[in-house]
Amino acid sequence: MDAADMGADLEKVLITEEEIQARLAELATEIWENYAGEPFLLVGILKGAVLVMADLMRAIPGSVPMDWMAVSSYGSGTKSSGVVRILKDLDTDITGRHVVIVEDIIDSGLTLSWIRANLESRGPKSVEICTLLRKPDAAKVAIDCRWVGFDIPNDFVVGYGLDFAEAYRNLRVVGTLAPHVYS
Ligand code: XMP
Ligand code: MG
């Protein structure tokens, strides 16, 4: 499947490559200025946040470390249950450090609220969240997210790290899948 074929599987492009990069540049500046020279750690959630992390951190105008966590959400099918298992934990001790969680999308919010509580239990100086996408109409728990790229409708989206059965993560845009892909 080449890039053109992937594009043909989309019903609609919701966010273009240019829009993603422009917004990430804004968020990078806001994050950098928020810490005013104090060190902070970016924590990406695998695998969806890989592309957000790569572009966000390169737009930050100073050196910043990163670490990664992988979690799996127990639940039926594609719906998040909020019961989370850590598949890969951080390599670093976050005690006394400022942490920014980097995510691709907040849907129900259940996964991220569990991750945040887990990280907060480790005694960090602070924990904030930066997500590229958020679905306000899908929220099941209120989640205080400091930096949001785009609020989007409650439809399944792929691209820019987001997958359908592991496909489409390498699309440069975010879009909805055409119905023929499901059948
Ligand atoms: P919750 O509901 O806990 O889920 O906020 C967050 C995780 O679910 C995945 N997710 C999606 N993946 N398109 C995707 O490719 C979507 O529209 C979508 N909505 C949720 C994603 O892994 C996210 O971290
Ligand atoms: Mg994810």
Image (cartoon, helix red, strand yellow):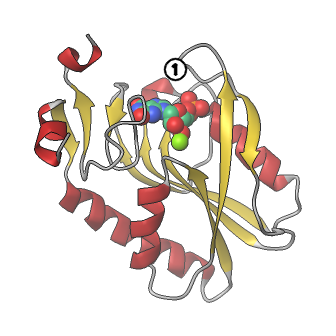
Q: Is residue 80 left or right of residue 123?
A: left
- Picture quadrant of residue 36: bottom right
x%, y% of residue 48? 48, 47
Q: Quadrant of the C terminus?
A: top left
x%, y% of residue 181? 24, 20
Residue under pointer 1: 78
Residue drawn at (27%, 66%) of the image? 22
Q: Is residue 123 left or right of residue 2?
A: right
Q: Secondary structure at mark 1?
A: loop
In this view of the protein, can residue 27 be seen by the observer? no
Q: Is residue 177 left or right of residue 58?
A: left
Residue drawn at (62%, 47%) of the image? 144
Relative depth, front residue between 162 and 105:
162
- Picture quadrant of residue 9: top left
In this view of the protein, can residue 151 be seen by the observer? yes
x%, y% of residue 25? 35, 71
- Picture quadrant of residue 58: bottom left
Q: Quadrant of the N terminus?
A: top left
Where 145 sits versus 36, above or below?
Answer: above
Residue drawn at (40%, 41%) of the image? 162
Asked whether mark 1 and ligand 1 are closer than 8 Å, the reply comes as yes
Extreme top residue here?
Answer: 183
The amino acid sitting under disc 1 is Thr
Where 5 sits versus 59, above or below?
Answer: above
x%, y% of residue 180? 18, 16
Residue drawn at (13%, 38%) of the image? 5
Number of numbered labels in the structure image: 1
Relative depth, front residue between 116 and 44:
44
Relative depth, front residue between 64 and 145:
64
